Image (spheres, rainbow, N blue to C red):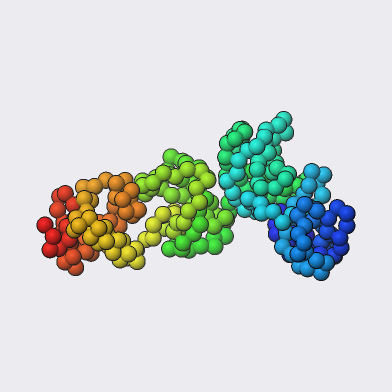
Amino acid sequence: MLFIGKYNHLTIERVTSVGMFLSDVEGEEVLLPNQYLTDEMQVGDNIKVFVYLDSEDRPVATTETPKIIRNEFAFLEVKDVSEYGAFMDWGLIKDLFVPFREQSKPMEIGEWYVVFLYMDQKTSRLLASTRIDKFVDNERLTVKEGDEVDLLIWQKTDLGYNAVVNQYHKGLIYGNEVFRELKAGDSLKGYVKKIREDNRLDISLQKAGIEVIEPSANQILEEVKKGNGFLNLSDSSSPEEIYKRLQISKKVFKKAIGALYKQGLIKLANDGIYLVGED
């Protein structure tokens, strides 16, 4: 069967005046229009295409790369708004439809939103939704504490930032642990800091545990050397300043300089860090 809203590996069956017809292993066919054909394509070739629905809700194939595929999340721009809903740019000729019922707040032309792409069971159409909470699933976790994960920030809250974790789960990054600007649509790496009893995920932007100390200590030592034996950061420096300069938290910074101090590599002073042997 054809997988609508996803990539399919299909065989070129025949050439017509409107394009090539491709088929799956069960013999179901879909048109790849002329505009996507290349001279290299031959009958019998197996090619990778994206299959979606055209303006008449018929399956059609394309070699273009969409910005989102079915059952995933992405950050997209609204191109138009009508009496029926909003239309988003997802990289294909036909825009992606977001009905009003799937908008957590009224969408505006030119604005960007995190959306989920799904197949509507009632209409068999591909639709997008900004009601992200409906589509994240924490009942069946596929991650464990300490795992590195892919994050997509979708909203700021009183506690911090909600993020889509690995295109599947919901996670929270606490605001008091963030020392950089984050906004909806940001894609970045993070780590599962804690899994709570109700399967809520606490996410950190830094690794937890001792494994992060050694590389951070080496980084600080290199910065001291680059500064001719001095780095103007200390225990009294703000978490924001430390993160801006080193991209590590103040907690990690203090542990790292403590390790360097115990090794006799640095001296600690009120105005900063000195390399041993330097004044």
Does 12 sit left or right of 128 as displayed?
right
Q: Looking at the image, is 29 positioned above or below residue 110? A: below
Q: Residue at x 86, y 52 (%)?
A: 18
Q: Looking at the image, is 155 positioned above or below residue 68? A: above
Does 263 sit left or right of 39 as displayed?
left
Quarter of the figure with residue 39: bottom right
Q: Residue at x 44, y 45 (%)?
A: 182
The C terminus sits in image quarter: bottom left
In x, y percent, where is residue 206?
39, 57
Q: Closer to the camera, 20 or 259?
A: 20
Does 208 sit left or right of 261 as displayed?
right
Q: Residue at x 19, y 55 (%)?
A: 230
In x, y percent, where is residue 46?
76, 67
Q: Residue at x 57, y 55 (%)?
A: 167
Does 219 sit left or right of 184 as displayed?
left
User: How many numbered tags mark residues here?
Assistant: 0
Question: Residue most toward the right?
Answer: 17
Q: Looking at the image, is 30 positioned above or below residue 177? A: below
Question: Residue most toward the top?
Answer: 83
The N terminus sits in image quarter: bottom right
In x, y percent, where is residue 197?
47, 56
Quarter of the figure with residue 45: bottom right
In x, y percent, where is residue 250?
29, 52
Q: Kindly tell me whether residue 229 is visible in this rendering.
A: yes
Q: Closer to the camera, 113 or 46?
A: 46
Q: Kindly tell me whether residue 131 is visible in this rendering.
A: no
Q: Closer to the camera, 143 or 244?
A: 244
